[in-house]
Amino acid sequence: MSVVIESSWKEKLAEEFEKPYFKELSAFVKTEYQKNTVYPAPKNIFAAFDLCPFNQVKVVILGQDPYHGPKQAIGLSFAVSHGVQNPPSLRNIFKEVQEDTGVDSDVINGDLSRWATQGVLLLNATLTVRAGAAGSHQGKGWEEFTDAVIRTLSEEREHLVFILWGNYARSKGAHIDRAKHLVIESPHPSPFSAHGGFFGSKPFSKANAYLETNGLTPIDWR
């Protein structure tokens, strides 16, 4: 079936797009956009892939759902549109960036496209959500699709960094070959858990140290 996504990903995931679950998922998502307000905008469903082609991926940061409030979700995990107030988890991410790398978090805006274009795949486990209804598109097939994304990266690439925040993200880590890649795990940056081990976990400097050790350009986390 025809899916509008960056060409290298379209090639790598071609088999997924033809599977029955994905066809059912596509029909469900299409109907949802017709009948309800759904985020992100249709053009941004695959934004994480469009900004970060398969062979350019260096780091994967895994989220769960897109934000379900207006003008927030842009198709990149944890990111929001420029000019939109940063949600609590993102504010905590920026606090850790500052503590970990010395970047001044007061000047960081929430549109993380600048990370994505450097090779950070900002991947949500579920790529769409109904407005005001967190988790409303879970269990419809997106999780199977994003498992395939993680598995394909793990099998076909080497020396990637997977950053898994919280128990849900950790569960997705079952598809990662830890002999080939670095997996960084900690509690979620949510205000409910950030003080339980997210703060001070230094994922950004750890990721860059690993990239540099393997001859790769580090990420500018500003």
Image: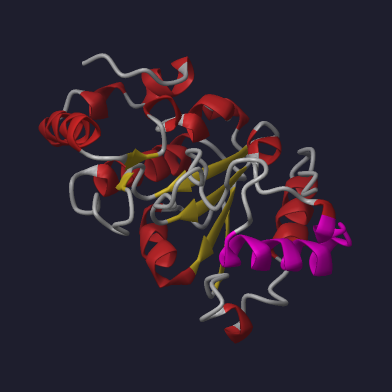
Q: Nearer the viewer, residue 159 or 67?
A: 67
> Is residue 135 positioned above or below 11 on the image?
below
**Magenta segment, principal secondary structure?**
helix
Residue drawn at x 14%, y 29% is 27
Based on the picture, tell me whether residue 89 belongs to the magenta stretch.
yes
Q: Where does the magenta region start and end?
A: 87-106
Which quarter of the picture shows residue 160? Answer: top right
> Is residue 18 positioned above or below 122 on the image?
above
Residue 99 in percent (x, y) is at 82, 69
Which quarter of the picture shows residue 209? Answer: bottom right
Residue drawn at x 51%, y 48% is 77
Q: Nearer the viewer, residue 117 or 13?
A: 117
Based on the picture, tell me whether residue 188 belongs to the magenta stretch.
no
Left or right of 208, for residue 84: left
Residue drawn at x 51%, y 57% is 178
Which quarter of the picture shows residue 219? Answer: top right
Residue 123 in percent (x, y) is at 47, 45
For this orientation, the residue located farthest to the bottom is 196
Residue 177 in percent (x, y) is at 46, 53
Residue drawn at x 56%, y 77% is 191
> Is residue 19 positioned above or below 73 on the image?
above
Residue 156 in percent (x, y) is at 47, 34
Q: Nearer the viewer, residue 215 or 25?
A: 25
Left or right of 41, for residue 185: right
